Image: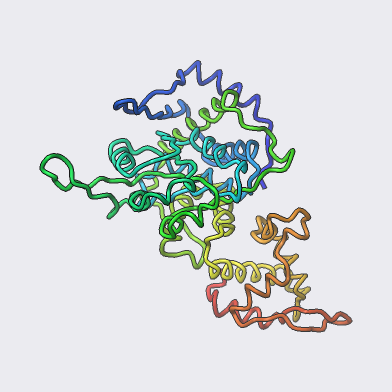
Amino acid sequence: MIKLKKLDAYFDNARVKGKAQEKREVRPVEKTKGIELYQPDPWPEAVDGAEVLTDIAEKLQQHMAMREAYTYAGTLWCAHAHCFEQFTHSPLIAISAPAPECGKSVLLSLLGALVPRPQSTDNMSPAPFFRLAASHKPTFLIDEVDAWFKEDSQLPSAINASFEKYGGGVLRCVGDSHEVQSFDTFTPVAVCGINVTKRLPPATVSRSIVIELDRALPGEVEIPYDQRKHRGELEVLSRKLARWISDNDFRNCDPTLPAGVMNRQADKWRPLFAIAEAAGGLWPEWAKRSLMSMPAVARATRETELLADISKVLGIYGSVYREVIFSRELARALSELDESLWADYNFRKHLPEERCIQPRQLASLLGDFHLSPRELRREDEKKRGYRRKDLEAVIARYLPDGS
């Protein structure tokens, strides 16, 4: 878990230093008939990647009541927006909530202060989207899509084309001669709205990293976001991020993805994993935790990851659980692993023992491997659990390399 730091002095020093070395101002990367897109000036000194990513994640946590895994995803997505053209795919961010006043627009505003060339809108038709995407490569921040997105059948296909570098784009006839022209729409896009996973077409959702928000309880947001006070701090981080990105080349990165992550899931997560591996520190593990927590992640991926972690548990506690491990013991041991995915499996619960994966959930995940808990005896205890040899047999079959 990220531990929030006292950043006030840090940002005060950064602002003073930044003004002394290079004046920070909103400068348009291009200006065409009122279109001005802010491009952050890279920080004048070298930047540590893990440090700036962690600082961004902490600022998001200060201003939002959101699950940590979503914080990691949002941070890595902002970094990818600075270098998306080095990758073959650019995942969308889809921010969703069940009701108003859950912080969707606030999060969109926070992301907008951290990305290059942000273009905010609460409505969009296809023509401005594909023309602006082709000419300026902005980071689109599209609000309230639940209210109007379904009314236009052409915009979803244009936004879907923003996902893929090769083969994407929009064909339109232009000019008096109606010449066919291809508009390249490969560019970062973030959308938000109420229940967007139900309102957006499945093809758009499958290209998106979904962030689910809930309405915050009193006191859950540490520092309510105020653009007048806090945007400058985020712009400092955006400049630092731009500098770190400019000092790295991600074009030949081939990050390791969890077992079972393939096809479109791999396409949309590979840029974020590449950035996390380049940053180092805990970020590769945090990227993995973020992916595994997403609602759209395939069940098979979670199951394979569970087998890998059960293998770790059996290795650690081999002398204790020589023949039998009870279900509740296994759930607890899984949750106690370093950077465990299972400690926060039921993230909406409040008590730690309720947040971790439960025996019935273990049984559900292991059921597809034809492995079910049964009444077992160990010395004087008799409870439901698993035979070690049965677990090891499944692990050997589905994780033959022991990973």
Is residue 116 something that shows in the picture? no
Relative to 296, 336 lies left or right: right
Give 370 or 15, whichever is nearer the viewer. 370
Is 17 left or right of 379, judged from the image as shown? left
311 or 242: nearer the eye? 242
Residue 329 horizontal/vertical position (percent): 77, 70
**Percent position of residue 154, x then y:** 33, 51
Count of numbered marks: 0
Instruction: Name the colouring of the figure.
Output: rainbow
Give the vertical position of 32 relative to 317 (above or below).
Answer: above
Report the residue at 48% width, 46% height from top: 147
Q: Is residue 115 visible?
A: yes
Residue farthest to the left?
177
Q: Residue at x 65, y 67 (%)?
A: 312
The residue under the point 51% across, 28% down is 235
Residue furthest front as drawn: 151
Looking at the image, residue 17 lies above or below residue 205: above
* Residue pictured at 38% horizontal, 41% vertical: 124
Q: Quadrant of the C terminus?
A: bottom right
Place of residue 2 in the rendered image (x, y in percent of width and height, measured from the top left): 66, 44
Q: Is residue 42 left or right of residue 301?
A: left
Outermost right residue? 380
Percent from the top left, x then y, of residue 351?
Answer: 78, 55
